[in-house]
Image: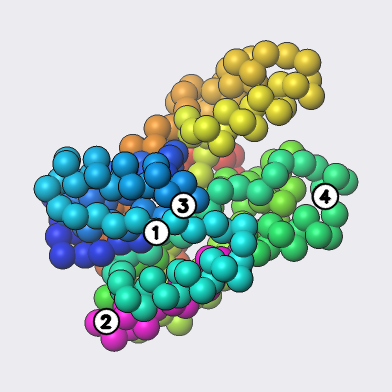
Amino acid sequence: MEISLKGKHALIGGSSRGIGLGIARQLARSGAQVTLAARSGNRLERLAGELKAETGREHRFIQVDYTRLDTYKSEIGNYLQAHPVDILVNNTQGPPAGTSLEQTTEDYQEAFDLLFQSVVHTTHCALPHMQDQGWGRIINVASVSVREPLGYLALSNSIRAAVVSWAKTLASDAGPYGITVNSVLTGYFDTERLASLNAKKAKQMGIAPEEVADALREKVPLRRLGQPGEYGYLAAFLASDQAAYLTGAVIPLDGGLLRSY
């Protein structure tokens, strides 16, 4: 099966590094014109240039800060009005780690704005074009903690579960327009975010970060961390015509980590 996204435009959030960048690279290699979105303008400009050199096509970028919701809503709304997209990958940086006893109501509000409000607003801005053309793909980067909460990620556990539930509802409403909506439950991937979480956990436990990483790998049946490029393969399929009958799905990409169905 050959996946072609030729003629499609994609916006990928959090795509200056890690999973977002892995998705952007694969969508571009599959023929899509991609727009990179993240906080680091200089890095995005360089990455857009690298993608152009690799694919021979122009790719765009937009510098946004998901933690500044009002500004973000204005910037992304204006961008999508001028540059409508066919494929939307909702992905942002994660909120701070911590247990439920450590978080305040203000912390939950900030996480809600970061993980939920930004996703819903971006999607609402992208939907009119998808509805008009009778085709669209919405992919949400979520977490395995939606099904099996991680004790040190109380904010992420709570808000990402809301995103997945919202996406399931949206899939029913958007289906008649030929728009699919799917969520991916992310396991342990070799990213800077995971390394940062491991370092914090190691400090609390008084051990080396590599010991924490080794323990994570032991929990995964495949005995390794995922690579961002592997995430891109799944995203490219979900964005393709071949996945036209797949919507409302919640797909674990975790090397077998989840023990529940």
x and y, in percent, of residue 217 in the image: 54, 23
Whichever of labels 1 and 4 marks the residue nearer the N terminus, that label is 1
Say which element carries label 4: loop
Residue depth check, mark 3 versus mark 4: number of the one nearer the observer: 3
- Residue at the (27%, 76%) spot, across then down: 135
**Mark 3 residue type:** Ala
Residue bearing the label numbered 4: 103
Distance of label 1 from label 3 (alpha carbons)? 7 Å
Residue bearing the label numbered 1: 62
- Residue at the (33%, 47%) spot, across then down: 45
Structural crowding at the residue carrying mark 4, measured as other residues with C-alpha within 10 Å and reported as few (<14), some (14–19) or many (≥20): some
Residue 47 location, quadrant: top left
Q: Which residues are magenta?
A: 115-134
Q: Is residue 99 above or below residue 11?
A: above
**Left or right of 115, for residue 133:** left
**Mark 1 residue type:** Ile
Residue depth check, mark 2 versus mark 4: number of the one nearer the observer: 4
Residue bearing the label numbered 3: 38
Q: Is residue 27 visible?
A: yes
Whichever of labels 3 and 2 marks the residue nearer the N terminus, that label is 3
**Mark 4 residue type:** Gln
